[in-house]
Image: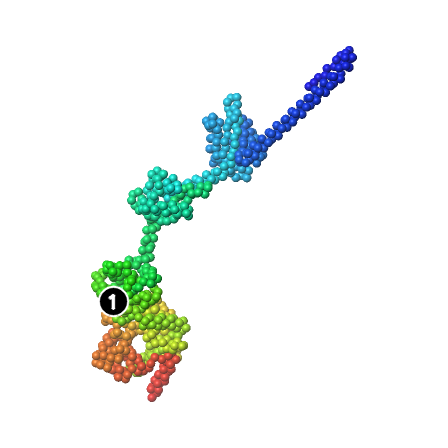
């Protein structure tokens, strides 16, 4: 600051002279001072602008990096944090928490952070560093890396100030956790993982690799990945495919260190670098030995017959289709065992199974039949003869096969002599597809069986026509059942002494609207073979019960109606219940019903037959043995059967013209009477036959001599006429 000093008054004259100069000097000095102040202010402004820009750069850098600065005055507890959003964050000034941001640290991390900070403040670490979770403004936690250092000490040497930075490492932590997860997966995965370079030199393996191969990690690192069971070109092919397609898949068989073999499902994939170039290969393989073993067993079970071990029907059809597709000439022989069902029924299914196994084993011992013999099911087998249509050679083989089968089998202390029927077809003469060939071979086999069995037959067109006709009849039966084309005719049974109607037999008739009457000899054998006879039998029984109930209500009849039971019906487990239902629905008393069972039916399983017959007799139903003398029942069984009646077959009645025939009928009648059974003679057509039967004391006569089978309407009239005739006789 300038000070102006005035001269004394006595110097007035001099002052006057100096005054202009002094004022000029003052003005110059003032101007200079002003100019100096201006430049100082301008310089200060430039400094502040630079400082502001520097602070802005620092803040922008911190914001861009995601870091935050903090400053902690330890003595006062004041904590300053510069947020990355360009605004400082003050956290409860002058608090005494330790650490100062204690309330924001995740409880699980607090102890670890506290220990690290204490160690640094105690001088045990050059700087403070900790990763932990820090609560943000929205109450969620963020992973941060906190680094700091003491920057000032008090006079007594204690830390008084500390600064540092916070870095948001949430993404790094997520990446780290992901890497740790992947690492744990590799460590614990059951599949072996091998990482190698592009020359198949192993860089790393996981523990599963050692478990599967038996090779330790240290022993294989930096060694070439090799497959010892394969030639070197195999790995070359893998390398080539990896370069071309980027991956390779396949199944391999390899050997462990201890020499055991294992199977694996192996895959190679290419790992590319940032330039998209192949950098490494990763191989993954899993031990599939157990799976392959199970698959092989399942394949064996699927393709092999579980009983005999022979290739099964599925393999046979595949093989046959292959031969047909390649148009290879071949012959097919299909055969089964004659009367095998009787062996099962009489000696048991287990013995039958043992017999089939012994047959398969016997035929397989002949090298000719190996890989040619198949089991189609049950007791049916097939033999494929490839690359031959030579009739002479095929015939020779068929004869040899019969001879092999005819040799006795010893099974469970039984000596079994069995026979077989063989059907033979030739490709392409007898069929153009596998199904046709097998169907025609079956047809030929059944014809051989019907021709007397223990023989072979070649398929011909006549057999095919018969098979087609059989199929047509089967379809016609099915349609007839649906449309109710089956009706019941009745043939009366007459008392041989009085001539009165004692009962009638219900006989099924198949009448179609267009084709007329279908012969029972045509449709009944087919129905029995297909099982349709069960439905037909139920229809006949129901209609017969309804008709008889009506005639009883009309006072025309008081006897019994005889209904035939087929073998398949008789073997039904619910037969008794089915009959109960029909009797209940038709309201016919059970004593008006008689069931006729053939001798052959009851002898299929005598023990079961006796049990069923007893149940029927307990219901009040009468039982008759039909066609007695045509089967092979023994008297020992006959006396056990709870029968009421024996029916003499028409063949015996027709043979009564000679003494031997009469004696046969006499014997049957005598046996029946001795067993307290009544006798019915069926098929009586002449007066001579009637007279002879009366002399032999046969009680009941049935046949055309009295009446042919009549429809329900005509039989009702027949009963009415019989009642009128009887009334006239009484009146006279």
Residue 637, quarter of picture = bottom left
Q: Could you say where residue 345 lies in the image, as x and y percent from the top left?
A: 27, 65
Q: Residues within 10 Å of mark 1 (few under 14, many from 20)?
A: few
Q: Is residue 317 visible?
A: no
Q: How many marks?
A: 1
Q: Is residue 69 above or below residue 466?
A: above
Q: Could you say where residue 512 lies in the image, as x and y percent from the top left?
A: 39, 76
Q: Tell me what residue is drawn at x 31 percent, y 60 percent.
A: 312
Residue 518, quarter of picture = bottom left
Side of 230 relative to 76 (left or right)? left
Q: Is residue 105 above or below residue 631?
A: above
Q: Is residue 230 above or below residue 413?
A: above
Q: Could you say where residue 384 lies in the image, as x and y percent from the top left?
A: 29, 62
Q: Residue furthest top?
A: 10
Residue highlighted by disc 1: 392
SS class, disc 1: helix
Residue 681, quarter of picture = bottom left
Q: Tell me what residue is drawn at x 46 percent, y 41 percent.
A: 274
Q: Tell me what residue is drawn at x 34 percent, y 79 percent.
A: 709
Side of 583 relative to 370 (left or right)? right
Query: Depth check: 411 or 430 in front?
Result: 430
Q: Is residue 423 above or below residue 291?
A: below
Q: Quadrant of the C terminus?
A: bottom left
Query: Depth check: 333 or 131 in front?
Result: 333
Q: Quadrant of the N terminus?
A: top right
Query: Depth check: 612 or 541 in front?
Result: 541
């Amino acid at each position: 600051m300038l000070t102006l000093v005035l001269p004394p008054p006595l110097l007035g004259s001099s002052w006057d002279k100096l005054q202009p100069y002094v004022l000029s000097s003052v003005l110059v000095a003032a101007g200079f001072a002003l100019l100096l102040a201006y430049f100082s202010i301008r310089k200060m402004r430039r400094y502040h602008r630079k400082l502001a820009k520097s602070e802005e750069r620092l803040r922008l850098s911190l914001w861009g990096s995601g870091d935050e600065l903090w400053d902690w005055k330890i003595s006062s507890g004041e904590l300053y944090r510069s947020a990355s959003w360009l605004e400082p964050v003050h956290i409860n000034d002058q608090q005494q928490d330790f650490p100062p941001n204690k309330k924001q640290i995740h409880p699980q991390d607090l102890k670890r952070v506290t220990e690290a900070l204490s160690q640094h403040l105690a001088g045990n670490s050059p700087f403070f560093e900790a990763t932990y979770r820090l609560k943000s403004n929205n109450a969620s936690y963020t992973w941060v890396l906190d680094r700091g250092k003491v920057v000032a000490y008090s006079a007594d040497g204690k830390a008084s100030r500390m600064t540092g930075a916070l870095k948001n490492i949430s993404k790094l932590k997520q990446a780290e956790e992901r890497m740790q997860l992947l690492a744990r997966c590799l460590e614990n995965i059951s599949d072996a993982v091998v990482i190698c370079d592009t020359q198949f030199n192993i860089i790393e393996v996981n523990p599963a690799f050692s478990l599967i191969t038996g090779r330790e990690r240290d022993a294989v690192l930096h060694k070439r990945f090799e497959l010892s069971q394969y030639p070197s070109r195999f790995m070359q092919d893998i390398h080539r495919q990896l370069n071309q397609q980027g991956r390779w898949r396949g199944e391999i068989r390899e050997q462990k260190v201890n020499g055991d073999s294992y199977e694996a499902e192996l895959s190679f994939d290419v790992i590319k670098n940032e330039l998209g170039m192949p950098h490494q290969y990763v191989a993954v393989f899993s031990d599939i030995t157990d799976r392959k073993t199970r698959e092989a067993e399942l394949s064996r079970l699927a393709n092999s017959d579980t009983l005999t071990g022979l290739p099964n029907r599925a393999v046979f059809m595949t093989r046959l289709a292959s031969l047909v597709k390649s148009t290879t000439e071949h012959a097919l022989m299909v055969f089964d065992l004659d009367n095998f069902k009787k062996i099962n029924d009489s000696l048991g299914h287990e013995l039958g199974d043992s017999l089939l196994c012994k047959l398969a084993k016997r035929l397989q011992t002949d090298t000719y039949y190996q890989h040619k013999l198949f089991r189609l099911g049950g007791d049916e087998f097939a033999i494929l003869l490839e690359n031959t249509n030579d009739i002479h050679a095929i015939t020779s083989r068929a004869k040899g096969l019969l001879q092999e089968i005819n040799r006795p089998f010893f099974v469970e202390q039984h000596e079994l002599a069995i026979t077989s029927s063989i059907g033979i077809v030739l490709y392409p003469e007898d069929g153009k597809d596998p199904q046709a060939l097998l169907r025609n071979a079956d047809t030929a086999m059944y014809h051989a069986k019907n021709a007397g069995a223990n023989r072979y037959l070649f398929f011909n067109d006549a057999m095919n026509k018969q098979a087609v006709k059989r199929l047509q009849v089967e379809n016609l039966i099915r349609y007839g059942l649906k449309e109710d084309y089956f009706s019941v005719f009745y043939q009366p049974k007459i008392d041989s002494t009085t001539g009165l109607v004692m009962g009638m037999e219900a006989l099924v008739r198949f009448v179609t609207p267009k084709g007329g009457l279908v012969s029972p000899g045509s449709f009944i054998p087919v129905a029995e073979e297909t099982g349709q006879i069960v439905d037909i039998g139920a229809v006949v029984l129901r209609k017969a019960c309804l008709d008889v109930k009506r005639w009883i209500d009309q006072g025309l009849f008081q006897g019994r109606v005889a209904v035939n039971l087929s073998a398949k019906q008789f073997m039904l487990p619910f037969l008794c219940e089915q009959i109960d239902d029909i009797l209940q629905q038709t309201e016919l008393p059970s004593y008006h019903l008689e069931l006729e069972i053939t001798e052959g039916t009851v002898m299929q399983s005598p023990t079961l037959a006796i049990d069923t017959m007893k149940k029927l007799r307990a219901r009040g139903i009468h039982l008759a043995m039909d066609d007695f003398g045509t089967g092979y029942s023994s008297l020992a069984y006959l006396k056990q059967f709870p029968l009421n009646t024996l029916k003499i077959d028409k063949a015996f009645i027709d043979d009564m013209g000679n003494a031997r025939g009469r004696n046969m009928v006499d014997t049957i009648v005598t046996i029946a009477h001795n067993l307290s059974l009544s006798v019915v003679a069926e098929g009586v057509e002449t007066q001579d036959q009637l007279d002879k039967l009366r002399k032999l004391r046969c009680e009941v006569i049935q046949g055309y001599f009295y009446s042919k089978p009549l429809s329900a309407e005509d039989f009702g009239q027949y009963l009415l006429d019989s009642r009128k005739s009887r009334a006239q006789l009484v009146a006279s």
